[in-house]
Amino acid sequence: MKRLLLSVFNGRVVSPWWILLIDMGISANAFVLAFILRLNVQLTTYSVSEMVIGASWVLSVYLVSFLLFGSYRGVIRHSNYNELKLLAIACFSAFLFLIISSSVFDIFSYNSIKIPRLVLIFHFLMTIVLSFTFRILVKETYVSLTKKNTSTNVLLYGAGDMGQITLEAIRSDKDNQYNVVGIVDDNPTKWNVMLHSIPVMNWEKALRIGEAKQVEVVILAINHISVKRKHEITDACLDKGWKLKVMPSVGNWVNGISNQNQIRDIRIEDILGREEIRLNQLQIMDGLAGKVIAVTGAAGSIGSEIVRQLLRFPVKRIVMVDMAESALYDLQQELLLTHSDAPFDVILADATNVKRMGEMFEKYRPQIVFNAAAYKHVPLLEEFPYEAIRVNVGAVKVLADLAAKNNVEKFVMVSTDKAVNPTNVMGASKRICEIYIQALSQLADTKTEFVTTRFGNVLGSNGSVVPLFKRQIERGGPITVTHKDITRYFMTIPEACQLVLEAGFMGRGGEIFVFDMGDPVKIVDLAKEMVRLSGLKLGEDIDITYTGLRPGEKLYEELLASKENTMPTHHEKIMIAKVRQYEYRAVEEKLKNLLLALQMESNQHLVARMKELVPEYKSQNSQYSELDKQMIP
C-alpha cells in the first residue's frame, strides 16, 4: 500500500484543475450537509428543485471566487500558511457575496433563489474546514511516506518567526534527517505551550530533556540574540557533545530561499562578534538612492560585501572593478543568481592604471566611490615593499585624483588599524594613503568629500587567521600561532562593511573614522575555540605550535578608539581620529617622488622614503629596523 501511495506522490504534481474539481466537490457536499443541519434545527420542508437551484447558485459563486483568487493553484503536498490564507479569503469572499445577494433578493422579493442564511453560514464553515482538512491530510500523508526512517533528534532554539520558518523548512524537506523534539525560547510567556504539537521550554529544561531524548543537534533559529548568550549556548552544547547549527537570517539566505539546506554549522564568527550595529538606514538610503556607485577591489572580502550591502538600497548602478579575474567572475556569477535584476557592471582592470580608470570615470560617471583595492598581507609586503607602494599608494592616488577631477560626491577609502603608529610596510602604505586623501580634501577647489574608515582584523576574510586555522584543523594540525601572547581586535565582514557605509555618509570630508573594536582577542584562545567547535580535543587530537613573530608583526595592535586619540560622533561605535594635518603640495610632491622611485630605487631606499612621509613608522622585527637608526638620502 505504501509503495502504491509513493508511486502516486513521487515526482508528480496534480493538475490545478483537479484540485479545483475536488474543492468544488467539497463545496457541493458541504452544501448538502449544511441543509441537513438546518433541517435538524428547524423542521421546515424544502423542495428538491429549490435545493438544486440554491446549490447551483452557491457553487457558481464559489467557483468564480476560486478562479479569481487562484486558491486551487498550489501544490497540495507543499501547502503552507499563505496558500491556506488564500483559500480562506476566497471562501469568505464567496460567502460575503451570497449574504449580500440574499439580502438584495429579499428586498426585491425575488423568490427563485431562496437559501436560508443559516445554511450559507454552515456551508461556509464546512467548506473551509473540509478544504483545510483535505490539504493537511495530503501534506501529512506525503511527509509520513517520504520521511527517512533514520532521523536525528534536535532541539530548535527560537519559537518566533525564524523558528517557525525553520521548522517548516525541516518538515517540508523529504530528505530531512532532523526530528524536532523540543523548541527552546528565552521568553517566559512562550514556555509550557505547544507549537505545532512540539513543546516550548526554557534552556535549562531543554538541557535536561535533551539527554533523555538523545538529542544530537541544536539549531539556533533566532534573529536577535546577544553574542554573550550565543557563547553560553555554544559552551553548553559542547559540554553535552551536541552539535550546534545556525539558521541564517533572511538577508543571508542563499538565493533568498528558505530550506533546511540553509542550516549550517556554527562558525567562530558567530560567537566572536559583538552586538549588532544599528545603522542610520534613512541617511544611507538618501545618500545612495539613484546614484552610480563604483567599488574598487570589488572581488575581495570587503569589496564584495560592500557590493552585497549596496544592493539592499535603491542605487542606480554599481560598477565593480578588480584585477583578480577568477574572484571577479565568481562575484559576477553570484550576483546573476541572487540579484539577476540588479543594475551592475564588472570591469577587469588594475586600479593603478590611469588610462583604464579614466575610461571608467568617463563612461559611468560614478557619484560615489568605495575604494577597497589594496594588498594587505603583512609578511609578503614586508618582503616586497615595491608592490605595497605601487598598489596601495598608487591606486589611491589615481582614484582620488580622478574623483576630484570628476567632482565625485564622495570618496570612501578602506584603511586598517595597522596604519596607527605603523610597524610594517603594509601599515605605512595605508597611512600614506590616509595622509594623501586627507590633504587633498583640504584644497579649496575640491568638491569631493574624502572619507577614511579604519578597522581591525576581519574574521573570515581572504588570507586571515580563521581560514588558515580551519585548513590546519582539517589536516589534523598542528595549528601555528606566532606567539602565545599575541592579541588582535576582530570584527566580522558585515560589521566592517556596515561601518564603511555608515561612516561614508556621516563624513563631510577629511575625516578618518575609527570603530569601537571592543576587547582584544588572544589568537591562541581563538585557536582553542575553533578546536572545540570542530569537536576535537587540544593535546589529544591536535596541537598548537608557536612559530615566532613574523617580520613587521606587532604583539599587540594599537587601540583604535580611546578618549585620548578620538572625538565622538552621533554613533556610539564610530569615532573620528585625531591625526596630524598635512599640507597638500608637500605631500603630493613626496608621493610623486615615491612612485617615480619605484622604477629605480632599492627596497631600502623605498622604505626610507615611506618613513620620511610617516615619521611615526618604526619597523619592528624587520630588515628595515636599521633605517630607524640612520638617515638614508
Image (cartoon, helix red, strand yellow):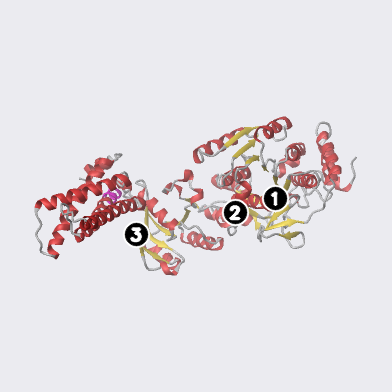
Give x and y (percent) for residue 426. Answer: 74, 44
Element class at badge 1 = strand
Nearest the camera: 624 or 248?
Answer: 248
Mark 2, residue position: 282
Of pointers 1 and 2, the one earlier in the residue sequence: 2
Element class at badge 3 = loop
In the image, taking residue 367 as reference, residue 72 lies left or right, namely left
User: Label 2 neighbourhood size at 10 Å, few (<14), some (14-19), many (20+)?
Assistant: few
Element class at badge 2 = helix
In the image, taking residue 7 as reference, residue 81 lies left or right, namely right
- Amino acid type for the residue under numbered disc 3: His
- Compared with 30, 290 (above or below) is above
Of pointers 3 and 2, the one earlier in the residue sequence: 3
Which contiguous range is marked in magenta?
138-145
- Amino acid type for the residue under numbered disc 1: Thr
What residue is at 61 percent from the left and 32 percent from the top?
Answer: 325
Labels 1, 2: front one: 2
Give x and y (percent) for residue 455. Answer: 68, 52
Give x and y (percent) for residue 7. Answer: 25, 40
What residue is at 56 percent from the left and 51 percent from the top?
Answer: 542
Q: Is residue 472 magenta?
A: no
Q: Quadrant of the C terminus?
A: top right
The dominant secondary structure in magenta is: helix
Nearest the camera: 62 or 517?
Answer: 62
Residue 443: image tag: none
User: Label 1 neighbourhood size at 10 Å, few (<14), some (14-19), many (20+)?
Assistant: many
Mark 1, residue position: 453
Q: Quadrant of the N terminus?
A: top left
